[in-house]
């Protein structure tokens, strides 16, 4: 399987070079990049699938650098990631065959080159088993994806790209420090040495925390998410699919690798798992809440990536908790739920981004407010997008439901097994997941309904046409995968369970029996396949009965909807903002947090921009224009001052003279000091 | 085999009784308004009449509107088949998981709101969006109360929960009782009774999201919505009032369970009808306060669970 | 064991009734709920007496019945009639019911964590009830802080007092009747004094709103 992988990397490199050479002939460059890319993806897919079922393979490829050999580790987890990214890459290239036609005048040669390098560097990050090379490829992945983000060349993409670059490097720095901590403790840059060393618990915790936030910045967890909704939409849609479906999973992969693999001998700590679960819960709720406020189809999807990363982390965190407590069932089921959701999210998010790309291709706009009525004009895209929406909303029997079901079972199982504190944490997580689920339904009713249903609200929407065959094929392939991962869950679950078991180095937990999914500790079963069959039969029977009645008594079409006696008008239609306004009404405070995080992110980016300008350092890729603008808009000192001012205002309100405030004061102080006494004792 | 029979009986019971329950509710309302009211069988007449009518489709509507009524009714039927209503165990355990039931309920809601947007009518769409937001408001409380019960009974399967509650083995008791109260409130919201009845606003928003449906589709949808009310009420009965349901599947026990179940369901529906007519209509924006109060109750029950009383 | 769990169930009922006292719209209903809570308190004493076999607790329950179920609510209802129309008693609280319930839940949880380290002389099984007793202190405080009507703030004091009563019963079930008499009369006098003050404030200022009354200071 390593040979296949090397073949894939070679094909990617050839594609990159060829497409760069053919820069002057866009059509040829596109064809070369896409076909070679597809070949590379097919080869890596085969190798990834082979790796899932086979024992881990450690190989030393030598390399040009004297102090660090290029070692690769091909274990089932790496195989899963490789397979997922390969599927996405395959579909993205297929989609690109037609979609890249729009980029002929924007340097399609460079685009093909960077995209090939991007895919190859992702593969290498996954496989690499040496800290030095890991960081090199990680950086290469960030840089190539940055180039893909700014390919449009407009101001918005530069801005998003710059923020992305800064965030990626903050993450990079944290990961590098984490690796350095471990390397200095064990005296080698080889991951093999890391995993053979039992680190000091404090050092292990520091390394884990740094790696968690560093990889988390790549994965887009709150509070490092602000780059995601700006950078992903700016890239071409199939690249967005690859980034949102694939690249951010590398962040999750990194977290798992550091926790379960590199720090394996140091023993997991309960606190790590709680940290991951809490961050996951917060990310999932805030991600979906902010997605609801977006009217740009691709930004909305990007925010949903934040949400889904949160859900994945809920599973992974539960796995860490189970691992730390020695509860093998919990560890297995939690990690399995996280992995399953990782695969699912890659598939439906890829599908949805391709759908958004098709809409963009057909109408030239991503603004939902000006779309509408596309279902009639682009039926294939509409059906695929609807399937993706149902899947991401975790509606049975599609794949999102399967992984969320396991996540719920893992969370409830963890609460069942844990003490007081654990129960509180996991109740919080369950409630967060419930809110997320309900809001995701709302959000995708909005995304699909406003874009595809109703009547067209602009000339562009009226003139829309179905997209070319290769794009339709790409979407259909992912739709089929989503359906298969849902209906065939009972067959995929043991595979995922096996991967989770190999990560934990523990026996696999049974999670499926026959066509049923089983959760042992919470004594429950479900079966997406049975639900699908029953739905098909019952709904089909109902529909047949209704249609028979229609045939018997007639069916007419009334061209206009009822509008309380007024003539219906296109301005009366419900827009995305109508839905968002309702949610805002109920969840106002949550939107306040976003302003704070965003301005902080912009301020940090501004500081970096200034540093780039002043030092005129070698990072020539950083465009000067956006950085200057950032600085003008939100200087860091300004935002610090505003925080101080609001704190001051809060204190002055406390001193208002109300006796009840003083009571709260006194009791607060009392409780504080009592707690202090208890802690000190 | 006997389980399958039980499942079919449950489905038939809920589907056939749904119009009657809705008719009785209307009668109760009329009596409380000191009106004569229509016959309690009026809903059957309405449905039969609609079924024989010519259907008029709005021009903008497509497949989603067309598919929604069968999906709505069909999903409710499937949920009804899985609940432990007349016996303590789930007739089809594969459908009896709490999370499965709650997420299955999201399917009709999703399609319902999509269909409301589909017809391009602003009045229907407003109703559809409100339906969604109510779901958002009530979901956290529903899940939290059911989680309390799952932890108290050691399973997320409704049948195991029902068995544990019926044999008074669910521990700690006060937490379960408080969770039951919170769940009852949440179910009341989910049933779409006043003031949460956005689907059937009285004046110009007549029938909100249903405005564009007619003929057999409307009949199917109306039936589906009545069945939904019964299904939600039976979910409450199944989990928190399982007393009297057959613990072993003997024909006699099942018959007794059936009779008792109908009595419990009738009681719950009557109570809901009386409450509905005793409360006032509330502005939509303020509904959040009520649902968050329910969530507070659920949180309290969870704290009781944690501290073990 | 069943008996101790009965004590715990009654403890939970104390929390629920005290929430009702805090959340009730009118002062009248609050007073009635307070009487109900005191009845639960009496039942708790009886149950605890039956479980631990401490005869003092029966005496406690009798005196608690006389003072808390009958006398204190009586005084409060009487005050309510005295105040009459001269001031609005039923001002809405400053916090929404949802936040109140959430706050109570948090307080109970924190108290449980706090008492989990304490060894009880009666039995470890009633630890939740001790948490409830401690939580009543905070619930009473919550009531005082969030209520605008000073009449309703009196209930905050009463709830704190009930909490200390339960805590005493759990920590020192063998305490002599004299202690109990002390607590009961203390409570009665405090309530009487507060009631008289409410009446006079209502008569002079025609308002019971603590925000308005804050203007009187200085």
Image: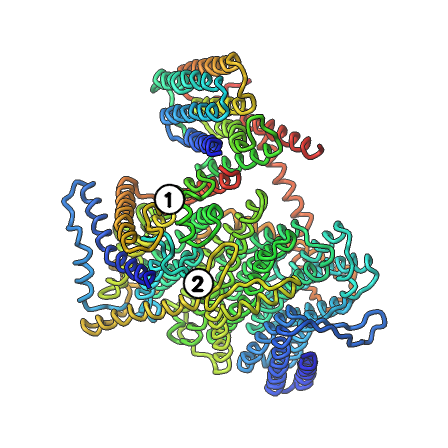
Q: Quadrant of residue B123?
A: bottom left
Viewport quadrant of the N terminus of chain A:
bottom right
Q: Residue at x 55, y 32 (%)?
A: C127
Residue B291 on image: x %, y %: 41, 45
Residue C100 on image: x %, y %: 47, 36
**At numbered mark 2, what does the secondary structure look like: helix, strand or loop?**
loop
**At numbered mark 1, what does the secondary structure look like: helix, strand or loop?**
helix
Q: Quadrant of residue A644?
A: top right
**Residues tagged 1 and 2 counted as in contact (Cβ below 8 A):** no
Q: Is residue A88 left or right of residue A540?
A: right
Is any part of residue A578 visible from this angle? no
Judging by the rendered image, the residue that carries numbered circle 1 is B185
Q: Residue at x 37, y 44 (%)?
A: B185
Q: Is residue A100 above or below residue B231?
A: below
Q: Chain of mark 1?
A: B
Residue B82 on image: x %, y %: 36, 59
Front residue of C113/A181: it is: C113
Compute the Cα span from label 1 to label 2.
Answer: 25 Å
Q: Are marks 1 and 2 on the same chain?
A: no
Viewport quadrant of the C terminus of chain A:
top right
Q: Residue at x 29, y 56 (%)?
A: B227
Q: Residue at x 29, y 60 (%)?
A: B11
Q: Quadrant of residue A451?
A: bottom left
Judging by the rendered image, the residue that carries numbered circle 2 is A395
């Amino acid at each position: 399987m390593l040979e296949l992988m090397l073949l894939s990397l070679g094909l990617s490199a050839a594609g990159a070079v060829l497409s760069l050479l053919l820069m002057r002939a866009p059509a040829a460059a596109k064809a070369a990049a896409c076909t070679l890319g597809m070949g590379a993806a097919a080869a890596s897919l085969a190798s990834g699938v082979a790796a899932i079922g086979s024992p881990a393979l450690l190989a030393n490829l030598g390399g040009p650098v004297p102090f660090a050999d290029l070692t690769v580790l091909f274990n089932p987890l790496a195989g899963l990631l490789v397979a997922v990214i390969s599927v996405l890459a395959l579909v993205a290239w297929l989609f690109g065959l037609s979609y890249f036609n729009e980029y002929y005048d924007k340097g399609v040669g460079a685009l093909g080159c960077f995209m090939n390098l991007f895919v190859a560097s992702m593969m290498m990050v996954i496989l690499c088993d040496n800290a030095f090379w890991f960081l090199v490829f990680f950086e290469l992945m960030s840089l190539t994806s940055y180039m893909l983000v700014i390919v449009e060349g407009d101001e918005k993409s530069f801005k998003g790209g710059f923020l992305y670059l800064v965030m990626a490097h903050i993450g990079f720095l944290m990961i590098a420090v984490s690796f350095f901590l471990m390397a200095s403790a064990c005296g080698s840059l080889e991951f093999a040495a890391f995993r053979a060393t039992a680190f000091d618990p404090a050092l292990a915790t520091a390394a884990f925390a740094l790696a968690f936030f560093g990889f988390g910045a790549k994965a887009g967890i709150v509070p490092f998410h602000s780059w995601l909704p700006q950078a992903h939409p700016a890239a071409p849609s199939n690249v967005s699919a690859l980034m949102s479906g694939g690249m951010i999973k590398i962040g999750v992969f990194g977290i798992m690798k550091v926790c379960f693999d590199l720090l394996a001998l140091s023993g997991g700590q309960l606190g790590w798992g709680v940290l991951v679960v809490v961050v996951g819960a917060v990310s999932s709720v805030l991600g979906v809440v902010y997605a609801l406020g977006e009217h740009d189809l691709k930004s909305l999807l990007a925010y949903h990536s934040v949400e889904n990363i949160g859900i994945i982390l809920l599973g992974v965190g539960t796995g860490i908790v189970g691992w730390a407590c020695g509860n093998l069932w919990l560890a297995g089921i939690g990690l399995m739920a996280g992995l399953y959701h990782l695969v699912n999210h890659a598939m439906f998010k890829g599908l949805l981004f391709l759908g958004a790309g098709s809409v963009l291709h057909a109408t030239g706009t991503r603004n939902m407010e000006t779309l509408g009525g596309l279902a009639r004009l682009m039926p294939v895209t509409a059906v695929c997008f609807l399937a993706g929406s149902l899947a991401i909303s975790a509606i049975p029997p599609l794949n999102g439901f399967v992984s969320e079901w396991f996540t719920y079972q893992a969370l409830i199982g963890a609460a069942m097994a844990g003490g007081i504190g654990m129960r509180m944490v996991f109740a919080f997580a369950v409630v967060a997941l419930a809110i997320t689920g309900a809001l995701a339904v709302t959000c995708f009713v909005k995304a699909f309904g406003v874009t595809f249903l109703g009547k067209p609200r602009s000339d562009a929407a009226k003139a829309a046409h179905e997209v070319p065959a290769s794009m339709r094929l790409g979407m259909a392939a992912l739709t089929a995968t989503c359906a298969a991962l849902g209906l065939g869950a009972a067959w995929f679950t043991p595979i995922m369970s096996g991967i989770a078991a190999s990560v934990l180095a523990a026996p696999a937990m049974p999670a499926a029996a026959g066509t049923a999914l089983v959760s042992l500790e919470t004594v429950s079963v479900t079966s997406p396949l049975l639900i699908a069959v029953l739905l098909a039969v019952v709904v089909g029977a109902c529909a047949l009965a209704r249609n028979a009645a229609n045939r018997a008594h007639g069916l007419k079409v009334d061209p206009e909807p009822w509008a309380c006696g007024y003539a219906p008008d296109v301005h009366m239609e419900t827009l995305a903002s109508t839905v968002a306004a309702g949610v805002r009404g109920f969840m106002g405070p949550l939107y306040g947090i976003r302003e704070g995080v965003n301005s902080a992110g912009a301020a940090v980016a501004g500081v970096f921009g200034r540093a780039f300008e002043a030092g005129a350092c070698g990072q020539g890729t950083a465009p000067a224009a956006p950085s200057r603008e950032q600085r003008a808009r939100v200087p860091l000192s300004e935002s610090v001052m505003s925080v101080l001012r609001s704190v001051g205002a809060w204190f002055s309100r406390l001193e208002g003279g109300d006796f009840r405030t003083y009571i709260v004061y006194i009791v607060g102080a009392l409780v504080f000091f009592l707690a202090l006494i208890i802690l000190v004792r | 085999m006997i389980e399958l029979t039980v499942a079919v009986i449950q489905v038939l019971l809920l589907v056939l009784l749904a119009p009657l329950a809705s008719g009785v509710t209307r009668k109760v309302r009329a009596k409380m308004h000191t009106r004569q009211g229509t016959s309690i069988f009026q809903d059957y007449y309405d449905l039969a009449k609609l079924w024989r009518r010519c259907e008029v489709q709005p021009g903008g509507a497509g497949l989603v509107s067309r598919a929604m009524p069968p999906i709505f009714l069909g999903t409710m039927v499937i949920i009804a088949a899985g609940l432990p209503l007349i016996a303590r165990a789930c007739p089809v355990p594969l459908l009896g998981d709490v999370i499965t039931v709650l997420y299955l309920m999201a399917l009709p809601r999703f399609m319902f709101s999509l269909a409301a947007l589909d017809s391009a009518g602003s009045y229907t769409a407003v109703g559809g969006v409100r339906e969604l937001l109510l779901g958002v408001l009530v979901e956290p409380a529903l899940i939290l109360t059911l989680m309390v019960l799952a932890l108290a009974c050691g399973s997320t399967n409704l049948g195991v929960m029902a068995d544990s509650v019926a044999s008074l083995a669910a521990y700690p008791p006060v937490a379960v009782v408080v969770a039951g109260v919170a769940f009852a409130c949440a179910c009341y919201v989910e049933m779409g009774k006043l003031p949460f009845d956005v689907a059937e606003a009285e004046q110009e928003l007549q029938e909100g999201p249903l405005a564009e449906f007619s003929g057999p589709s409307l009949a199917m949808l109306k039936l589906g919505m009545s069945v939904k009310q019964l299904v939600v009420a039976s979910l409450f009965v199944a989990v928190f009032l399982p007393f009297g349901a057959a613990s072993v599947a003997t024909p006699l026990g099942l018959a007794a369970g059936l009779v008792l179940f109908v009595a419990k369901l009738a009681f719950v529906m009557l109570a809901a009808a009386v409450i509905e007519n005793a409360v006032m209509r509330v502005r939509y924006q303020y509904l959040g306060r009520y649902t968050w109060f329910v969530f507070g109750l659920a949180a309290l029950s969870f704290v009781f669970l944690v501290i073990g009383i | 064991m069943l008996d101790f769990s009965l004590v715990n169930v009654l403890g939970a009922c104390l929390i629920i009734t005290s929430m009702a006292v805090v959340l009730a719209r009118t002062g009248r209903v609050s007073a009635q709920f307070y009487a109900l809570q005191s009845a639960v308190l009496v039942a708790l004493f009886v149950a605890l007496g039956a479980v631990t076999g401490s005869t003092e607790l029966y005496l406690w329950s009798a005196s608690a019945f006389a003072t808390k179920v009958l006398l204190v609510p009586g005084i409060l209802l009487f005050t309510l009639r005295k105040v009459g129309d001269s001031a609005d008693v039923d001002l809405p609280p400053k916090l929404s019911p949802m936040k109140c319930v959430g706050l109570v839940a948090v307080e109970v949880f924190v108290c449980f964590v706090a008492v989990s380290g304490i060894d009880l002389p009666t039995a470890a099984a009633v630890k939740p009830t001790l948490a409830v007793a401690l939580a009543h202190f905070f619930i009473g405080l919550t009531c005082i802080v969030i209520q605008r009507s000073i009449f309703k703030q009196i209930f905050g004091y009463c709830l704190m007092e009930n909490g200390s009563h339960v805590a005493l019963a759990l920590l020192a079930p063998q305490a002599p009747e004299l202690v109990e008499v002390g607590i009961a009369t203390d409570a009665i006098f405090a309530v009487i004094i507060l009631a008289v003050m409410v009446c006079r404030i209502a008569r002079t200022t025609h308002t019971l709103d603590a925000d308005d009354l804050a203007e009187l200071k200085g």
